[in-house]
Image (spheres, rainbow, N blue to C red):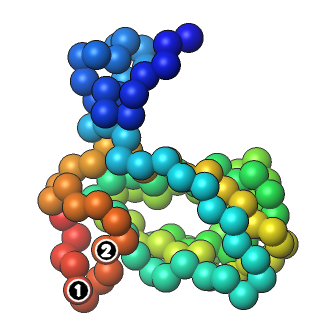
Amino acid sequence: MPVIKNEDFGSERAPAWCRVQGGIVGIGHSTKEVGATVEFHFHDYEEFWFVLKGAARVVSEGHEYVARRGDVVCTAMGEEHALTEILEAPYEHVWLACHRRGCERVGHLHRGVDEPA
């Protein structure tokens, strides 16, 4: 089991079997309580939320889902998504953003302000 630095995932420095094409943009952890939301936004990369605790209502490209412990929320580059309601608190997930492309912008991008890549 190698330990690979974040900046090496998309490079030849990582073994072929564990490379993430385009590299990892970011990894983080989020805990939300009842009343918390995350605004509608999109990214120039894929994003995955690995739900650890609780449940939340999420919307992606106009479709509503309930994400619960053990689920993985998968968002493709350019898909507008949001966390609209905490159903069971605390809601906790680890997120992974990878495979940056398009305009290669980082962070939350918004329709009407930032054009999709």
Residue at coordinates 31% horizontally, 27% vertically from top-left? 8
Give the camera-side residue of 49 and 5.
5
Question: Counting other residues with Cα less than 10 Å from the Cα at mark 1, is it few (<14), some (14-19), or many (20 or more)?
Answer: few
Question: Counting other residues with Cα less than 10 Å from the Cα at mark 2, is it few (<14), some (14-19), or many (20 or more)?
Answer: some
Amino acid at pointer 1: Val
Amino acid at pointer 2: Leu
| Left or right of 73 on screen, residue 25 | left
Give the camera-side residue of 29 and 74.
29
Query: x, y percentage for residue 48?
Result: 52, 51
Determine contact: label 1, label 2, CB under 8 Å.
yes
Residue farthest along the left direction in this orientation: 103
Disc 2 designates what residue? 109
Residue at coordinates 80% horizontally, 57% vertically from top-left? 53
Query: x, y percentage for residue 28?
Result: 54, 52
9 lies above or below 92:
above
| Left or right of 117 on screen, residue 78 | right
Give the camera-side residue of 63 and 37.
37
Query: x, y percentage for residue 115?
Result: 19, 76
67 lies above or below 40:
above
Residue at coordinates 77% horizontally, 82% vertically from top-left? 34
54 lies above or below 6:
below
Residue 66 visible at all: no
| Left or right of 43 on screen, residue 70 | right
In space, the residues marked 1 and 2 are separated at their CA atoms by 8 Å
Q: Which mark is residue 113?
A: 1
Residue at coordinates 36% horizontally, 71% vertically from top-left? 108
